[in-house]
Amino acid sequence: MAEFDLNKIKKVHFIGIGGIGISAIARMMLKRRKAVSGSDRSASIITDELKRLGARIFIGQKASQVPKDADLVIYTIAIPEKNPELARAKELGVPVLTYPQALGAISRDHFTIAVSGTHGKTTTTAMIGGIFKDAKKDPTVIVGSLIGKAKSNLIAGRSKYFIAEACEYRRSFLNLEPRIIVITNIDNDHLDYYKNIKEIQKAFSEFVSKLGKDDYLVTDAKNPNVLPVVRKARCRVIDFKKESVKGLRLVIPGKHNVSNAQAALAVSKIAGIPRSTALKSLASFKGTWRRFEFKGKTKSGALVYDDYGHHPTEIKATLSAAREFMEKIKNGPEKLVVVFQPHLYSRTKFLFKDFSNSFSQADEVIIVPIYAAREADDGTVSSATLAEAIRKKGVKAKAASSFKEAERMLVDFSGKEFLILTMGAGEAYKIGEAVIES
């Protein structure tokens, strides 16, 4: 990809503008007073907010929606090559960038802190961004969730610092030009692209090889899955697990969030931010959208939370955090009910055994139909087969044929003795919202 100066463009069109990452760049372009248009397959709170900010939004994708005078088209890598808008942009001779390439273009002009890892990168990115903002470092932050009162995935700063969530899927993070890389952890994921853990580790090694001898890798250096990457690193390696937790107070529960905070503290130390400032910022951090997010109460008093977790490791960590949270509430919920929407047939199939072992801390589990996204159903795995596997592990589990059926099942768990937790990368959160409203 040739270098592209985002400062020179006046009109940009986004394909898949409702995506949690790509929409942040759309926000950035709007703040820079660029003319922004974009399309997505369905409306959402993200597209509604972009429209309010001045973007021209199309629901559905047609070639005619690409402006003939566009200076640039940015598209999500989730769309197929035959997408009509992408084909039209190429036909018009408009320069096109993938979302990761656009991130790379921003990265080249900044001191980039790239936060990567299979789990925890969204929360860690938000924590680091919050610390830098509170320390008056005026950073630009792009995070894969919505943060703060403004519910935005962008902090638009003017300093040299660019803090970005760096995704390993299809080696997207190789587009970035980082000075500091955070690796929260490495685990089996995106197995529709990577063959095994060794291939994933190789991708992370390629990413870390972009760092020079005066740059930094911040990671859990003794983690067995991270160790092969650390051994090949030519940069300075900082083990965030050695970061003291003395004085650390978090609103959000879970040991995994303590680990995320340690990584954030390590990065703030490198940047010369006083520890007291970092600790104060972390103490006020209230989490991000869809990360153990409180949604409300049912009329009968059940607490309803939602979490984006869709990998076995994430499920275990979130359920553990939920139990920790429940124990701290006086006269609060005693039983944990989980509504889980598996994400992708391939992930469910490859990690089936791990998924079946992930719900031991739940009292009841409802599995709704698999969120297919870009995949076709080959008939080898389903919500019913996963529910059966979970039952064999001694946990009560049922499969729901639809969201509506899941809502009906939750009627039995609407009392104040229950905490209902919807989980998954798809749209399971809508079930919790419906139960609150009904």
Image: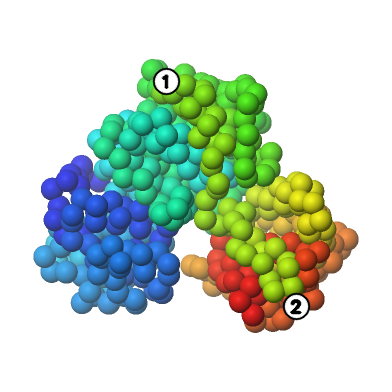
Gap between marks 1 and 2 measured at Cα: 52 Å
Q: In which quarter of the image is residue 336?
A: bottom right
At mark 2, the secondary structure is helix
Asked if residue 5 lies left or right of residue 234, the reply is: left
Q: State the residue at coordinates (48%, 43%).
A: 126
Q: Which of 193 and 53 is in front in this view?
A: 53
Q: Residues within 10 Å of mark 1 (few under 14, many from 20)?
A: few
Q: Which mark is residue 411?
A: 2
- To which residue does mark 1 refer? 272
Quadrant of the image containing the C terminus? bottom right
Q: Is residue 54 visible?
A: yes
Q: Which amino acid does label 1 sit on?
A: Gly
Quick check: 419 above or below 376?
Answer: above
- Which of the 4 image quadrants contains residue 345? bottom right
* Residue that appears at 52% across and 24% down: 276
Callout 2 amino acid = Val
318 relative to 393 in the view: left or right: left
Return the mark for residue 209.
none
Instruction: Find residue 333 and report its horizontal and vertical position in percent.
Output: 79, 59
Q: State how the image is colored.
A: rainbow
Q: Earlier in the sequence, mark 1 or mark 2?
A: 1
Crowding near the residue tagged with mark 2, few <14, some 14–19, many ≥20 C-alpha atoms within 10 Å: few
Depth check: give the residue in front, 141 or 196.
141
